[in-house]
Image (cartoon, rainbow, N blue to C red):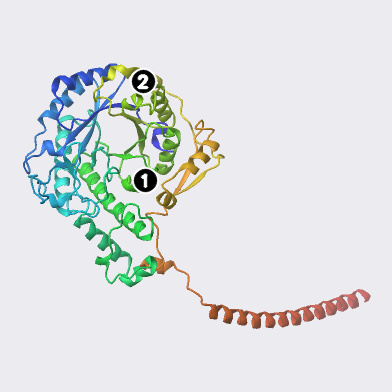
Amino acid sequence: MVESVTTAKRRLAFVIWNFEITERGVFEQLVDRAHRQGFSTIRLHLSWFNAEKTPGVYDFAPYDEQIDYIASKGMDVILTVDLQRSVHISENGVKTALDAVIDTDEFQYAYGADTHVPDTLYGTAMVSYASPRGIECMTRFYGAAINHFAKRFGHKVIAYAYPTFTPYCETEYWCAGAYDYSVHMKRAFEAYLSSLYETAADLNLDLGTEYHTFAEVPMPADTDRSPLGVLFYQCRHKVLKALIDRLADVQKNEAPEIPFALQFGCVWDAASIRRCTLGFADLSEKADLVVVDDAPGFDHAFSMDYVASALDGSKKTFGNEIDGYYMIDNGTTTAEGYIEQGLTSYRHNASVQYVANWMVDEPLSNYGYIFSTVSQEYLEVEQPECVCEDAETEQIPVSLLRLFETGDARDYQDDYRRISDDGEHFCRLNIHDDLTAKVYPNSVAGRDIQIDVITPADVQKEEEKKSVKDTAMAVAALGAAAAILALGVAVKVFFSDRDDK
């Protein structure tokens, strides 16, 4: 099992979004309230577009003040560096470079559109993960931020640090928007196809198409589950992993003592296809902490055992997120449901839980008893109850390709509930990555492992040869049998003669 089963320190972290820097009085009130209600950690957001408005000029002072106050309460910080930029389009639709750090052309573009994908919540947009210049600017800022906070506060205050890319503050593609269809991703897709196939004609054999060059191959819509859709998913996965790995390397170089964390939305539901996180274990190769944020109605025991199974042997810690109070108000869940999520996630070996969206239009104090209850049962207990793996328990095979094609994990969850006694026990899910690792027959790799195709004429010839061979073998067998029989008689006669003597 993973490290969190036995050794990882458990944390309950209150999230302060901080997209626009929170006013000091409000900020201190939030920290004070979270501290009183059992939170050990504050997850603090630092927005790139706030901290670097002029290229190479960084303003971290407001965040220094905030972290100083958190530390004064004896709490530590999970630092989230949100790598979006603030941009917009002029009224006539012409692309404008109003961001002083990143040109508009470096951002992600919507499907079939000639403009970037803006975020309607914060007026920001996501940089294309395939843009060389965008990645360079992003990496430079992330390194500067990590260097600053590591030197000023160290790992005793900064418990974890990590980058996020979306308005939901996750290290993935934005599931509520569209895939990246920018020119940068188009070039990346063309390069990916050319790395897999010798010619477009070979690709056509697998796709049933008639493209003359790789440049003609379109980036498919997000509903495409055909082989082309699989290839585009693989490309997006590789682009995302390359960026995550690069930022992980930057952090480990600038502050090796601060663990690198990642946050994904759910890693097995239908939206995971758009997030490109079905292969999250591969994306998490260099991470120390992996957190997913389940919806309140999800099966949290299943989620945590799924994540634990995927990360097994990696010595990573993992966790879950408890979403906003408004889901109580709209009937999606109840306060008791949130308590169940918190306790179940910890019981299934989560080491960190975030509490997000609890500062929007509603004081945390209304539902603070939820988190006091969770804290008392798992953070304040030296050895809380956790599930352990039984080697004899039935295991569940999971196909990522099937999840990609159907977006439906209900059958797996039904099996899980049956085997785990509805989450009472740990249940291992054997996750088979037949999606990002899928190889098609006419690719270079596919031809290396492909069995030679046999025509009907070849089959007939082989059968004729087999018939002749069988006849010859039969004759030989009869001859051998006769010889053995004769030999046996001779031996019998020989020994009989000797016995007579």
| Residue at the far front in the pictured view | 92
Q: Crowding at label 1, few (<14), some or many (≥20) Cα neighbours within 10 Å?
A: many
Residue at image point 35% right, 24% down = 328
Q: Quick check: 154 left or right of 350?
A: left
The image quarter in which residue 4 lies: top left
Three-letter code for the amino acid on which mark 2 is drawn: Ile
SS at circle 2 = helix
Q: Position of residue 321 (x, y in %)?
A: 33, 32
Q: Crowding at label 2, few (<14), some or many (≥20) Cα neighbours within 10 Å?
A: some
Q: Position of residue 242 (x, y in %)?
A: 26, 51
The image quarter in which residue 256 lies: top left
- Decide if residue 298 is in sight here: yes
Residue at image point 6% right, 41% down = 54
Q: CA distance from mark 2 to mark 1?
A: 31 Å
What residue is shown with label 2?
Answer: 370
Compare residues 1 and 62 and report the one nearer the observer.
62
What residue is shown with label 1?
Answer: 281
Compare residues 368 and 238 and report the one nearer the observer.
368
